Image: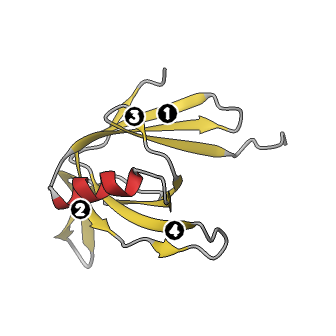
Amino acid sequence: MPKNDMVEKKILLVDNEELPGLRQIAEYIIEDGVVRIPGRNKDVPVRNGVTVIPEIEAIYKITRDSQTLKFFEDWYYKNETHEVTIIRTDGAGAEFKRELWPNTEIAKLSAPAYDASAPVAAQANVKFLPEDIIPIDAE
């Protein structure tokens, strides 16, 4: 098995600009809503045609000279929406997937927490609420 064959890097762009400090984006599942139809001695799950768009959490490293926290605070407190693009690359940096999250809001913004492994930095959690998740061709 080749080394790093399962390595994946995610790049998050907001309005086509990368915000510094991204540490992690949680995995998420896009699923259809389900209703249960009673049948003979069992309930049968059936798709209801409504896609459930998940909230997506990200962790950012915040440093003193970073403008990332200020940008997130403006986004959250001013109820702004932005276009978010997620780019997934393999271990060698080749892009294999791209997603567009139009009209994305922030539902949660944590106060920066001290990071014991990096005393000059803090960590902030952000929860994104995309209006949709649209797969687009990788470039």
Q: What residue is pinned by disc 2?
A: 34
Residue visible at 67% across and 71% down?
117
Relative placement, left or right, of 15 versus 58 is: left
Determine the image quadrant of residue 70: bottom left
Mark nearest the camera among 3 and 1 is 3
Total marks shown come to 4
- Nearer the N terminus, badge 3 or badge 1? 3
Relative placement, left or right, of 46 versus 61 is: left
Above or below: residue 70 compared with residue 44: above
Above or below: residue 70 compared with residue 88: below
Residue visible at 18% across and 61% down?
77
Q: Amino acid at mark 1?
A: Lys
Q: Position of residue 112 (x, y in %)?
A: 43, 71
Q: What residue is pinned by disc 3?
A: 17
Q: Amino acid at mark 3?
A: Glu
Between marks 2 and 1, how big is the CA–CA gap? 27 Å
Mark nearest the camera among 4 and 1 is 4
Relative placement, left or right, of 73 versus 26 is: left
* Residue 100 seen anywhere in this rendered image of the structure: yes
Within 10 Å of disc 2 (Cα), the crowding (few <14, some 14-19, many 20+) is some
In this rendered view, identify the residue nearer to me: 80 or 31: 80
Q: Quadrant of the N terminus?
A: top right
Between marks 4 and 1, how big is the CA–CA gap? 30 Å
Q: What residue is pinned by disc 1?
A: 97
Residue 122 badge: 4
Residue furthest out toward the left: 79
Between marks 2 and 4, how big is the CA–CA gap? 40 Å
* Residue 102 seen anywhere in this rendered image of the structure: no
- Nearer the N terminus, badge 4 or badge 3? 3
Q: Mark 4: which secondary structure? A: strand
Q: Mark 2: which secondary structure? A: strand
